[in-house]
């Protein structure tokens, strides 16, 4: 089951967008798939207040644990 999120704003393709009519679609593994118009998103869209940034990595954990690699 995919997840559909609509936020107040989102950062996508190096720009901050107002999310009046756009929805971010994620797959079952919470990987960002695409950005679609709200008309194409269907049902079960979760509306959030704030900014979404698809594609970010949890840098805190990755940096903190990177010394353990190998």
Image (tube, rainbow, N blue to C red):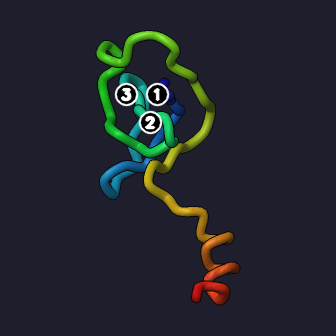
- The residue shown at (66%, 86%) is 68
On screen, residue 10 versus residue 67, left or right, reads left
Q: Which residue is mark 2?
A: 26
Q: Count how many numbered circles sit on residues in the image.
A: 3
Q: Position of residue 2 (x, y in %)?
A: 46, 27
Residue 4 appears anywhere in the view: no
User: Callout 2: helix, strand or loop?
Assistant: strand
13 versus 3 height, above or below: below
Which one is earlier in the sequence, the residue at label 2 or at label 1? 1
Which one is earlier in the sequence, the residue at label 3 or at label 1? 1
Q: Measure how far apart labels 2 and 3 are at the Cα level.
A: 13 Å
Pick whichever, 38 or 18, lies toward us: 38
Q: Which residue is mark 3?
A: 22
Rendering quarter of residue 35: top left
The crowding category of the residue bearing disc 2, from other C-alpha atoms within 10 Å (few below 14, some 14 to 19, many at least 20), is some
On screen, residue 67 versus residue 14, left or right, reads right
Q: Which residue is mark 1?
A: 2
Q: Measure how far apart labels 3 and 1 are at the Cα level.
A: 16 Å
* Quarter of the rendering occupied by the C terminus: bottom right
Check the image and name the residue furthest to the front: 70
Residue 62 appears anywhere in the view: yes
Rendering quarter of residue 51: top right
Evaluate if marks 2 and 1 touch, with contact meaning CB atoms under 8 Å apart.
yes
4 versus 44 height, above or below: below
Q: Position of residue 9 (x, y in %)?
A: 49, 39
């Amino acid at each position: 089951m995919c997840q559909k999120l609509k936020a107040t704003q989102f950062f996508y393709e190096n720009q901050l967008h107002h999310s009046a009519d756009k929805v971010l679609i994620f797959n079952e593994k919470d990987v960002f798939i695409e950005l679609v118009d709200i008309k194409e998103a269907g049902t079960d869209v979760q509306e959030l207040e704030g900014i979404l940034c698809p594609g970010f990595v949890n840098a805190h954990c990755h940096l903190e644990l990177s010394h353990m690699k190998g």
